[in-house]
Amino acid sequence: MLRIGVVTDSAAELPQSALAHPALSVLPVKIQIEGQVLLDRKDPEVTANFNAKHLNIKTATDVHSKAPSTEEVRDHYLQHLAIDFDHVFGMFVLGSRSPLFKNASDAASDVIAQSMAPRLAQGYKGPLFVEAYDSNNMSDGLSVLVQDALAQVDAEVSPAAMRSRINELVPKLHCYVVPSQLDFLATRAKARGDQSAGALAIAAAKLLGVVPIVLAKRGDTGPAAKVRGVEKARDHVLKLATREVMRGLKSKFVSLSYSGDPAEISVLSSYQGLVAACAAKGASLSLKAMSPTNSINVGPQALSLGFAAVDHDASL
């Protein structure tokens, strides 16, 4: 039987059940902060400590993240995947914000060529076949794609079926982000040199006293709605997700992450409504602490929510 593996990066906000899946491999992103380098390996204790101690205005100015290089991606495939799998599908954070998808694509041909000898030495014929996909999304949107791919592996689908499923889901991924501290978001955007419409809208929203709900979809990020107050904005996206779950999703996975204590979200009545909707529709819901790879860009107490659905109005 063909052994299919799934590779992603630490921007994917995955639950522990997915991280423990034997078919999954995660490329860690480097976080440079206060003269030290942290490899975001999705460790819950490291994540909680980072979010509690390092998300502040100074961090927004000074912290830097670095995606794995082409050589690092190649080495990861050859050292960790070439023997254990026959065909690997890589799904990465949106290429418009990170070079990782390009780096992974560039590494693919080297992996195919250089994997032949070590595989033959272990009795496996042919090279490791590698495919790389731009999720055109981020954090919890990417998480939905990866979790769905792991479910396809469990179903023992063919590479052709896996390829078709990925291409089907990518344009349907939605990731909504509710920031808590617009000062952090504006400072971070300025430090990154982000002059996009979304960054400018954040600055304008701060002046007006409203919270912009940011949507990532099909490679673009920008404001989808504006709500007065953080609590109301969180309720808005949770109720929006509940509505879309009841209408019918394109993948059963609903992913949430929070750059604070997730218990602050789990006690909300709007979250409990989402839990009930997922149970009624057979959707798989996960809530976890947001990884440093993402929290350094959205700041403390930010909520991210991803699902796959048809295009819809972000208003309620």
Image: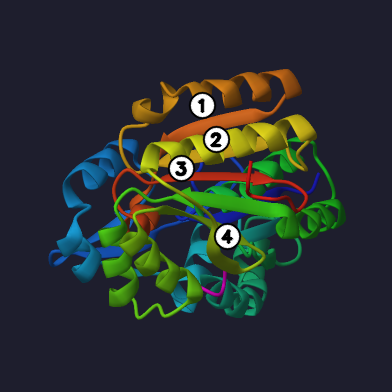
> Label 3: which residue?
233
| Image quadrant in which you'd find residue 94 | bottom right
The residue mark sitting in front, 4 or 3, is 3
Residue 6: image x %, image y %?
63, 52
Q: Closer to the camera, 284 or 156?
A: 284
Query: Counting other residues with Cα less than 10 Å from the Cα at mark 4, is it few (<14), some (14-19), or many (20 or more)?
Result: many
Residue drawn at the location 19% of the way across and 52% of the way down: 54
Q: Secondary structure at mark 2?
A: helix
> Label 2: which residue?
238
Q: Which residues are magenta?
A: 94-98
Q: In which quadrant of the rendered image does the C terminus lie?
A: top right
Q: In which quadrant of the rendered image does the N terminus lie?
A: top right
**Which amino acid is tagged 1?**
Tyr
Query: Counting other residues with Cα less than 10 Å from the Cα at mark 3, is it few (<14), some (14-19), or many (20 or more)?
Result: many
Residue drawn at the location 13% of the way across and 64% of the way down: 34
> Is disc 4 in contact with disc 2, using a CB cutoff of under 8 Å?
no
> Label 1: which residue?
271
> Label 4: which residue?
216
Image height of 107 relative to 60, above or below: below
Which comes sooner in the sequence, label 2 or label 1? 2
Q: Secondary structure at mark 1?
A: helix
> Is residue 97 shown in magenta?
yes
Image height of 145 relative to 285, above or below: below
The residue mark sitting in front, 4 or 2, is 2
The residue mark sitting in front, 3 or 1, is 3
**Which amino acid is tagged 3?**
Ala
